[in-house]
Image: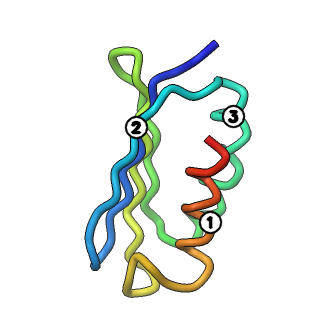
Amino acid sequence: TYTNVLIEIEGRLGRIETRGEYQDNHLANIDQHLNKLNERTGDCEVATAKNTTRIHIAYWASGTLFSGGGIALILWIIGVL
């Protein structure tokens, strides 16, 4: 089955938002990677409402959204979806 997903990523340089319909098994696969990201940033939230899964990531830890492994991990998450 498919789930509507909204991914919001924000940091000091701005905000990225992406939406789409994704397979549920892909959503399940990113849980561990969101947990890794959460360890670095301390702010990662996943919420489901009105048939949409909302993934909100605030990436402040390294001082900028586009730095180091953080952005690579974020792009990987989006790519996996």
Relative height, residue 53 to residue 57 (above, below)? above
Secondary structure of the residue carrying tag 3 is helix
Circle number at residue 26? 3
x and y percentages locating residue 43 in the rendered image: 42, 60
Q: Which residue is mark 1?
A: 73
x and y percentages locating residue 75 in the rendered image: 57, 61
Dot 1, crowdedness within 10 Å: few (<14), some or many (≥20)?
some
Q: Residue at x 26, y 70 (%)?
A: 14
**Left or right: 37, with 19 as reference point:** right
Q: Given the image, on which type of amino acid does mark 1 rest?
A: Leu
Dot 3, crowdedness within 10 Å: few (<14), some or many (≥20)?
some
Give the spatial CA distance, label 1 vs label 3: 15 Å
Secondary structure of the residue carrying tag 1 is helix
Q: Residue at x 29, y 63 (%)?
A: 15
Secondary structure of the residue carrying tag 2 is strand
Q: Which residue is mark 2?
A: 19
Q: Between 32 and 81, which is closer to the camera in this rendering?
A: 81
Q: Nearer the viewer, mark 1 or mark 2?
A: 2
Q: Residue at x 37, y 63 (%)?
A: 58
Dot 2, crowdedness within 10 Å: few (<14), some or many (≥20)?
some
Relative height, residue 56 to residue 1 (above, below)? below
Q: Nearer the viewer, mark 3 or mark 2?
A: 2
Q: Residue at x 42, y 45 (%)?
A: 7
- On-image quarter of the N terminus: top right
Q: Quadrant of residue 5?
A: top left
Q: Quadrant of residue 81?
A: top right
x and y percentages locating residue 24 in the rendered image: 65, 24
Precedes in sequence: disc 3 or disc 2 = 2
x and y percentages locating residue 33 in the rendered image: 67, 55
Relative height, residue 1 to residue 31 (above, below)? above
Q: Given the image, on which type of amino acid does mark 3 rest?
A: His
